Amino acid sequence: MVRAPRTSALRGKTLVKFVEGVAGDCVRVDESTVSIGNFCAVARKKYSVCEAGLIPEGKMFVCGTHPASFDSRYKNVGLMNECDCVGVVRVVLV
């Protein structure tokens, strides 16, 4: 779980997302496809896609499970601060 930074379009909201990239990982962008290592996702055309490059220290790239998730693939959400990570979600099978 991560709290979106004030500079994000989702400012102040607590989000449940997967961390797909951390400091030093390379974000690759090819038209509307964003990839980091084995993770690859298509971005919706109505939003500006994030920029390619290395994730800086103290930042992380987060994504949701739904293809239409609003996450780090988009400039108006962007990278999240590691210090804004407020919890870890674990699946518990009963």
Image (cartoon, rainbow, N blue to C red):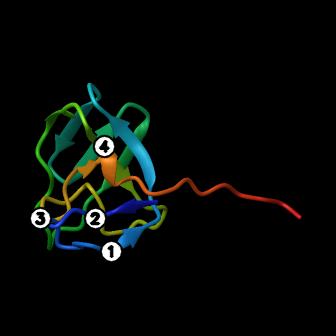
| Frontmost residue, 79 versus 52 | 79
Secondary structure at numbered mark 1: loop
Question: Whole-Å distance between the Cαs marked 3 and 1?
Answer: 12 Å
Q: Using the image, determine if residue 61 lies above or below residue 92.
A: above
- On the image, the x and y values in percent for residue 80 come to 27, 52
Task: Point out which mark residue 84 bears.
Answer: none
Task: Point out which mark residue 60 bears.
Answer: 4
Residue that mark 3 sits on: 7
Q: Using the image, determine if residue 57 lies above or below residue 33.
A: above
- On the image, the x and y values in percent for residue 27 come to 23, 36
| Frontmost residue, 18 versus 84 | 84
Residue in the image at 24% along x and 73% along y: 10
Residue that mark 2 sits on: 4
Residue that mark 1 sits on: 13
Whether label 3 touches label 4, CB < 8 Å: no
10 Å crowding of disc 3: few (<14), some (14-19), many (20+): few
Question: Whole-Å distance between the Cαs marked 1 and 2?
Answer: 6 Å
Whether label 3 touches label 1, CB < 8 Å: no
Amino acid residing under circle 4 = Met
Whether label 4 touches label 2, CB < 8 Å: no
Residue furthest right as drawn: 94
- 7 left or right, relative to 5: left
Residue in the image at 66% along x and 55% along y: 90
Question: Whole-Å distance between the Cαs marked 3 and 2?
Answer: 8 Å
Look at the image and tell me whether residue 68 can be seen.
Answer: no
- On the image, the x and y values in percent for residue 88 come to 55, 53
Look at the image and tell me whether residue 34 can be seen.
Answer: yes
